[in-house]
Image (cartoon, grey):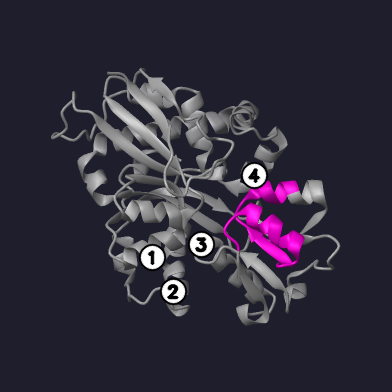
Amino acid sequence: MMNKIKKIIGLGLVLSLTLGLFVGCGQASAKASENKSEAADANEQRVIRLGNFPFSIWNAQIIVAYQNGYFDEVFEGKNVDVEITDFANGPAANEAFVAGDLDIINGIGDQPIVVGIANGVDTKILSGAAKQGENIGVIAPGDRGITSTADLKGKKVGVYIGTYVHKSIIGILNDAGLSEEDVELVNISSTSDASAAFASGDIDAYLSMSGDYIHEKVDGEGYVVVNDCANHPAFSYIVASAKFVDENQDILADFYDALDKAQKFIDENTDEAYSIIAEFSDYDVDTVRYTIENADIQLAWDEDYEQNLLETYDFLFSHEMITTELSEDDILDRVDTSIIDTYSK
């Protein structure tokens, strides 16, 4: 039986421009992983159930790895299926993860991770996926007189409450001497909801986690960037279930090999990579370039990713969004960088 990568539809799926495109068969070549599980039978069918999100900076590697055949290469002869399900947001993916329906989530934000740890979910944090800063931020229609963070006082600001940008908006407000009580935060879970809320007057400004949406609004519809997230970046991670990590070290290492190949291709063949991503996602190349170049999508682990998890816990606990007291060790013991540490960045 040939290896295959297939796109499946699950709860929380966004019917996006990427729908149905992760379908294919793989038969290619890859070196055997040094830490292959001794218990794994070479002929046993194994599946990686991957939670993903519609086009965003952190699945650039997924797109390039698929289009360039890197998944085919690393899983040749290993009888591995990859099932990819798109989710609308991190909480929806986390719900499926908690239910045991996913093995890996690519690009999940910090808040769902910390909430999961507080709730006893046996999560392993494998690496960082992206740091979004200058590519995302607070936008407002150009005709509403909102040109600075100070202008947000008394206004209705849309943000997806409970996700990583929730913490970012508080930081942006605090930098301008404002608190969350100085504005009305409106829970907006998608860019389509944001557009509708702008049209109806239900929000005056919006902090989007989608760089392509901001690019579209600013360049095409006369919106202005009130403040970006450079000083309060939004972090996303790659996580897996501890059970899956323990039982599948070999194919997990192969999965990272494919992503690493894709990242090197993006770094060394930037224009070609952007064209591949744009064609796959049905975006224009300028949008892809803006979205990626104003962020950091290097697969890595560093002190910023670590410190951010601790700060996110403090934020959630102080806002009573979680009530479980966690120590630094409770959080950092969930980090397993044994695979990402093998790559020289």
Q: Is residue 85 visible?
A: yes
Amino acid type, callout 4: Thr
Distance from Cα at disc 2 to Cα at disc 3: 11 Å
Q: Do the numbered discs 1 and 4 sit on residues whose CB atoms are within 8 Å?
A: no
Read off the residue under disc 4: 291
- Residue 329 left/right relative to 93: left
Q: Which mark is residue 90?
A: none
Read off the residue under disc 3: 163
Read off the residue under disc 2: 321
Instruction: Tell me where the magenta segment starts and ends, as one range.
Output: 188-216
Which residue is at 54% across, 52% downward? Answer: 131
Q: Do the numbered discs 1 and 3 sit on residues whose CB atoms are within 8 Å?
A: no
Residue nearer the viewer, 212 or 6 = 6
User: Which one is earlier in the sequence, the residue at label 4 or at label 2?
Assistant: 4
Distance from Cα at disc 1 to Cα at disc 2: 8 Å
User: Which one is earlier in the sequence, the residue at label 1 or at label 2?
Assistant: 1
The quadrant where residue 252 appears = top left
Amino acid type, callout 2: Met
Is label 4 in a helix, a strand or a loop? Answer: helix
